[in-house]
Amino acid sequence: MDDSPEDGPLFDPRITSYNWLAGVLGGVVTFVAGYLVMAATILMPDGPPEGLSLRELLAEIGRVFYNAHQVTLDLRPASDNVEIEDAPNTVNWSDVGPDSVITINTELLDPNQTIVWNADVEQMIPYEQVGLYVFDFSQYQEPVQHAQEKPELLYRLVPVIVLIAAGATLAYLTLSDSDSIHEAVLPAVAFSGGYTAVAVLGTFFVGQELAGGAVVLSPNLGQTIVFALMYSLLCGLLGSYAISAWRDRNGPIANH
């Protein structure tokens, strides 16, 4: 007779029995819900600004939503012909300024050459025969910091509050009263996976062309992965543990 112990399951039954699909879908829904709450925060009470198409408005809301997660909006060349340089020789520094950031199309050495530097927003200044499109990069890359209508903290709190509430809701729906408080980590992990995946996908839909299409403003992909994962995991854990602790204190928990 073989007295060797039977092999146990590869994963803890508490892990394999959890509804991971519901958790991931919860993260997807939460990202959309957070976007909608941010839209309401931006648009209320005055409504959308004039002159923006629906697509431009939705993309602008998205960029603010990403920036509220601490994600910086990057300027990247729209084509291989456009390069970002700190000090091109084709610009008179006395006209531009020592702290300028230059985007210059190095192959268009004609009147259509596009240059973008850090100065007043959307001024058009001549330099010999070259057209200079001028933008204040900081206002585009950190829209939350430059928000004037409402406090910066209000925008920062939107993803935090939504994620905590969603983590608590998911834990309430997917964990039973008999589950240990330590199992509260399961909804947060599943939830963060769905949230981060949609956040990465969304970066491809919220870009904005600047300088006549020479550069594109979009969320930094690496920061999106890091901060979306960090925000959703930590806030989801906070909400999930809050529900589990409340159940542990106020409701009967069966002993296993």
Image: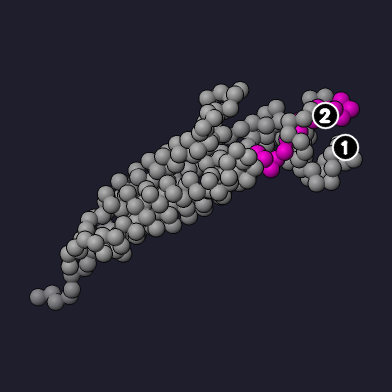
Please report the residue visible at 76 percent of the width from the left and 40 percent of the height from the top. 118
Does the magenta-highlighted stretch encompass residue 142? Answer: no
Please report the residue visible at 73 percent of the width from the left and 30 percent of the height from the top. 122
Q: For mark 2, give the secondary structure.
A: strand
Q: Which residue position is annotated with label 2?
A: 125
Can residue 221 be seen here? The reply is: no
Mark 2 is on which residue type?
Answer: Ile
Mark 1 is on which residue type?
Answer: Asp
Q: Is residue 168 left or right of residue 150?
A: left
Can residue 41 be seen here? The reply is: yes
Q: Which residue position is annotated with label 1?
A: 95
Q: Position of residue 218 (x, y in %)?
A: 59, 39
* Highlighted magenta segment, given as a residue range: 126-140
Q: Is residue 197 above or below residue 210?
A: below
Please report the residue visible at 63 percent of the width from the left and 45 percent of the height from the top. 145
Q: Position of residue 124 (x, y in %)?
A: 79, 28
Q: Position of residue 220 (x, y in %)?
A: 58, 45
Please report the residue visible at 34 percent of the width from the left and 56 percent of the height from the top. 240
Marks 1 and 2: CB-CB under 8 Å? yes
Q: Quadrant of the C terminus?
A: bottom left
Q: Is residue 173 left or right of residue 30?
A: left
